[in-house]
Image (cartoon, rainbow, N blue to C red):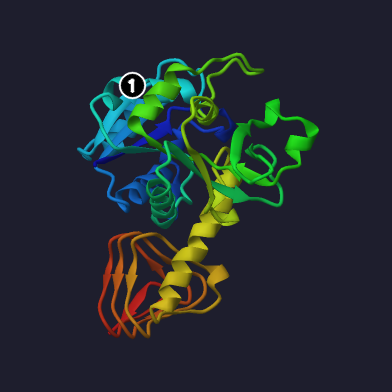
């Protein structure tokens, strides 16, 4: 069966205090939405239903060449459930499972999505979710389980009692749902809550009440949970991804001296035994050969090619 993903990227992002749509803000050289798409493609999603609203023209202009993306416009901001409802006509053409993900969660990894879908398939669940346990769960929907540890419901922060707010297991918006069950649950959503919005998280409660199996899998690390709602969180996520980039390069044989003082964008290839000295910048799409010395104080522009054995100090190439 085919696999589709719905990505919710229609928010106004007022807390960003910026004209640029949230989805296009860069993290380590790439728009944050790019990371969500790559995670989906990493688990063989064949089709993306991209829900856009604020800044849609800019987002479509950037990603429009990707023919796997089908664009869905949400003209009114009535909640995440309403955003997913905008996809109903496309979903009726689909059989199989559907991921639903937030467009402002660039720390998502395809490995987590694969874990989620494998558990979903093996348990024959109608709907599954990946959860995380956080030391500070403020702002996230809490996972309520029964005495046997089975999922009962998700309670949004605004709706939660003090006892429920003490729960540390949260839902970071990683959904995996069978298409027919998703359509059933979307039809039952109501907006009788404090915000007057249609909560997508309510689909799990509706399916459970209908006798369908719902699975909650603790599969998301605390680092993966951070979303981007403001520029401070953008910087925090950038720092996490920068650490991942440098860790991967070190594991492949690259020496990075004082990584805190270097910045390496995404999609950079660096050969073994190359040394990156402090205060160096390496731009997206660059290929650096083995046994090079980069820096200190080097600036390697995006899409550069640096041959094997090159020394680059203060932007001066020495053969």
Does 172 appear above or below 282? Answer: above
Does 290 appear above or below 23? Answer: below
- Relative placement, left or right, of 40 versus 142 is left
Q: Which residue is mark 1?
A: 88
Q: Quarter of the image for the N terminus: give it.
A: top left
Task: Residue at 41%, 79% (x, y): give it.
Answer: 254
Q: Position of residue 77 (x, y in %)?
A: 49, 19
Does 112 appear above or below 24? Answer: below
Q: Quarter of the image for the C terminus: give it.
A: bottom left
- Relative placement, left or right, of 151 versus 102 is right
Task: Residue at 64%, 31% (x, y): give it.
Answer: 155
Task: Residue at 27%, 50% (x, y): give it.
Answer: 44
Specify whether residue 29 is in view.
no
Q: Position of residue 247 (x, y in %)?
A: 48, 71
For the residue pair 92 and 138, the one nearer the viewer reads as: 92
The image quadrant of residue 94 is top left
- Relative placement, left or right, of 309 versus 155 is left
Specify whether residue 162 is in view.
yes
Task: Residue at 33%, 38% (x, y): give it.
Answer: 97
Q: Position of residue 128 (x, y in %)?
A: 46, 41
The image quadrant of residue 16 is top right
């Amino acid at each position: 069966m085919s696999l589709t993903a719905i990505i919710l990227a229609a928010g106004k992002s007022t807390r960003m205090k910026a004209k640029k749509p949230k989805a296009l803000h860069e993290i380590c050289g790439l728009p944050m939405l790019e990371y969500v798409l790559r995670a989906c493609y990493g688990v063989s999603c064949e089709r993306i239903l991209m829900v856009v609203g604020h800044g849609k023209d800019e987002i479509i202009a950037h990603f429009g060449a990707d023919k796997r993306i089908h664009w869905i416009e949400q003209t009114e901001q009535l909640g995440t459930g309403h955003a997913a409802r905008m996809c109903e006509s496309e979903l009726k053409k689909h059989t199989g499972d559907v991921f639903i993900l937030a467009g402002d969660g660039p720390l998502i990894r395809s490995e987590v999505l694969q874990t989620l879908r494998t558990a979903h398939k093996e348990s024959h669940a109608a709907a599954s979710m990946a959860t995380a346990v956080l030391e500070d769960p403020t702002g996230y929907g809490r996972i309520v389980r029964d005495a046997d540890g089975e999922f009962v419901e998700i309670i949004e922060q605004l709706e939660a009692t003090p006892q429920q707010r003490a729960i540390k297991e949260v839902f970071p918006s990683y959904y995996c749902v069978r298409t027919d069950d998703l359509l059933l649950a979307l039809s039952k959503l109501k907006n009788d809550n404090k915000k007057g919005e249609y909560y997508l998280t309510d689909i799990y409660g509706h399916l459970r009440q209908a006798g369908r199996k719902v699975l909650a899998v603790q599969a998301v690390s605390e680092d993966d949970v951070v979303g981007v709602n403001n520029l401070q969180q953008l910087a925090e996520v950038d720092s996490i991804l920068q650490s991942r980039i440098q860790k991967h390069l070190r594991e492949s044989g690259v020496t990075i001296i004082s990584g805190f003082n270097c910045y390496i964008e995404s999609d950079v290839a660096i050969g073994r035994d190359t040394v990156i000295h402090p205060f160096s910048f390496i731009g997206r799409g660059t290929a650096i050969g083995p046994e090079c010395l980069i820096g200190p104080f080097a600036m390697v522009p995006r899409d550069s090619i640096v041959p094997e054995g090159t020394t680059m100090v203060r932007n001066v190439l020495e053969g």
